[in-house]
Image (tube, rainbow, N blue to C red):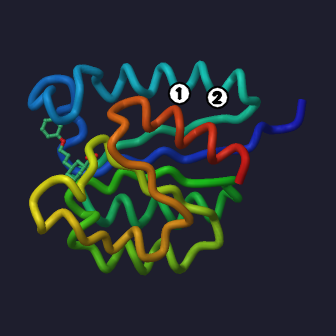
Amino acid sequence: MADRPLIYVLNGPNLNLLGTREPAIYGHDTLDDIAGRLEDQALELGVEVDVRQSNHEGHLVDWLHEAHARGAKAVIINPAAYTHTSVALLDAVKAISVPVIELHLSNPNQRESFRHHSFVGQAATATIAGFGPMGYALALQAAVWL
Ligand code: CA2
């Protein structure tokens, strides 16, 4: 059988703590819970997901390059705090020809003013924010139709 289209789901710093702290902001699901559901959803949609998390900016840059090199159909990325600081991630998103969906659990525009600016959002194809863990499912559904 032919390979299924590949969708990277990248997660930035501190998202390894999901489900263990600040549930009022980020929900009760762990990243493993989310990854498990995405894998089930991917099977139904006929795609493959590769879900990763790193606390290191350079890993996220490398993975964006890798998604391009492997011919990924799309990247879904929650850059976490690097959203608001990282020119390196902006440059990496610009450098690849893979569509990138920026994703946030919370709605950063309703939070502190330092979260209102997104470097990644300047180059992303689209942004999904404020739906909690369900945002990952919405992003995967959207990525299939890009
Ligand atoms: O809402 C989002 O998804 C964010 O990307 C989350 C980032 C935040 O810096 C962005 O402004 C918006 C923070 C991720 C921290 O994750 C934690 C999870 C559980 C407990 C503590 C932190």
Cβ of disc 1 within 8 Å of ligand 1? Answer: no
Left or right: 75, with 120 as reference point: right
Cβ of disc 2 within 8 Å of ligand 1? Answer: no
Q: Residues within 10 Å of mark 2 (few under 14, many from 20)?
A: many
Label at residue 38: 1
Tell me if residue 71 comes above or below residue 44 in the rendering.
Answer: below
Q: Residue at x 23, y 26 (%)?
A: 27
The reply to whether dot 2 and dot 1 touch (C-beta < 8 Å) is yes
Quick one: which residue is furthest to the front in this view?
110
In terms of image quadrants, where is residue 67? Answer: bottom right
Seen from the viewer's position, the closer of residues 1 and 140 is: 140
**What is the C-alpha distance between the residues marked 2 and 1?**
6 Å
Give the x, y percent position of residue 117.
25, 71
- What amino acid type should be assigned to the residue bearing mark 2? Ala
Seen from the viewer's position, the closer of residues 127 and 77 is: 127
Give the x, y percent position of residue 59.
35, 59
Q: Residue at x 50, y 20 (%)?
A: 37
- What amino acid type should be assigned to the residue bearing mark 1? Leu
Give the x, y percent position of residue 38.
53, 27
The residue at which mark 2 appears reads as 42
- Which structural element holds mark 2? helix
Q: Residue at x 31, y 66 (%)?
A: 58
